[in-house]
Amino acid sequence: VEVNELKIFTPGKVPDYVQKWQLPRENETDLILFSTHADDEHLFFAGLLPYYGAELDYEVLVVYLTGHQNFNLIRTHELLNGLWAVGIDTYPVIGTFTDFRKPTIEETYACFLQFGETKEMILEYVTEQIRRFKPKVVVGHDFAGEYGHGQHMVYAEVVAEALELTNDPAQFPHLAEKYGLWDVPKAYFHLYEENEIIMDWDRPLESFDGETAFAVSIYRGFQMHKTQI
């Protein structure tokens, strides 16, 4: 049995603990983080969200591949609580692709097909988000899947391919007509060996009372994902 608490307020000032989400801003996004699952954004990209989204107050959007709808909707609540805890108040884009785990990219694509989900569908999904929000920076997963997760591999590969076609009107022309074209100026992939950038996430952040960006991600953000801990 799952029990959720519902609170209803009379007119007046809403308590500070109530999450007040902002809509994503089309054409005005500074950074998109393409996170496969809820909790990946805090683990493999630890430090990024509290630093750029809260400390520097950039327009940061997280785009998830899966919303875990085939498992437990509690994870959606954890997802939102985790973002809020690290200073992100822009409501994320939550994909509907099936959540599962396979050790290779080939097996992952094959499993997606069993659920009626093709690589072309994932590529269209990513292309839509890039053209719609026009980010200045895109951040994606490790091509080796961090710890060997096939869905991370797929998302990294598809994001990289999307970056090559979002400025081509012949690719997904219905999206080009709806949102226009976009050529992302900068893209970074976790653990990518060429042109490597090492981020220092151990500096204190004023927006979090001196906590470091790494600590905020792990001890505030990830702690909201109680089903994964």
Image (tube, grey):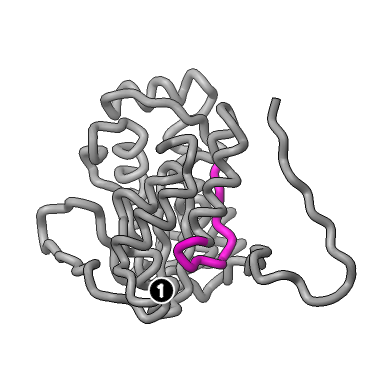
Classify mark 1: helix, strand or loop.
helix
x and y percent of residue 124 in the render?
49, 46
Of 24 and 71, which appears nearest the observer?
Answer: 71
Specify whether 151 is left or right of 143: right
Q: Is residue 86 rendered magenta in the image?
A: yes
Task: Find disc 1 in the rendering and name its residue.
Answer: 208
x and y percent of residue 225 in the render?
47, 44
Specify whether 120 is left or right of 203: right
x and y percent of residue 82 in the render?
49, 54
Q: Toward which corner of the image does residue 221 lie, by quadrant?
A: bottom left
Of 95 and 77, which appears nearest the observer?
Answer: 77
- Tell me the chief SS of the magenta region: loop
Q: Is residue 54 rendered magenta in the image?
A: no
Q: Is residue 214 above or below residue 143?
A: below
For the point 33% across and 76% down, the residue is 210
For the point 46% across and 23% down, the residue is 113
Q: In which quarter of the image is the C terminus?
A: top left
Q: What stretch is highlighted in magenta?
A: 85-95
Residue 110 visible (yes or no): yes
Q: In which quarter of the image is the N terminus?
A: top right
* Amino acid type assigned to the residue bearing label 1 in the image: Phe
Q: In this view, does 22 lie above or below 174?
A: below
For the point 74% across and 45% down, the residue is 5
For the point 29% across and 29% down, the residue is 105
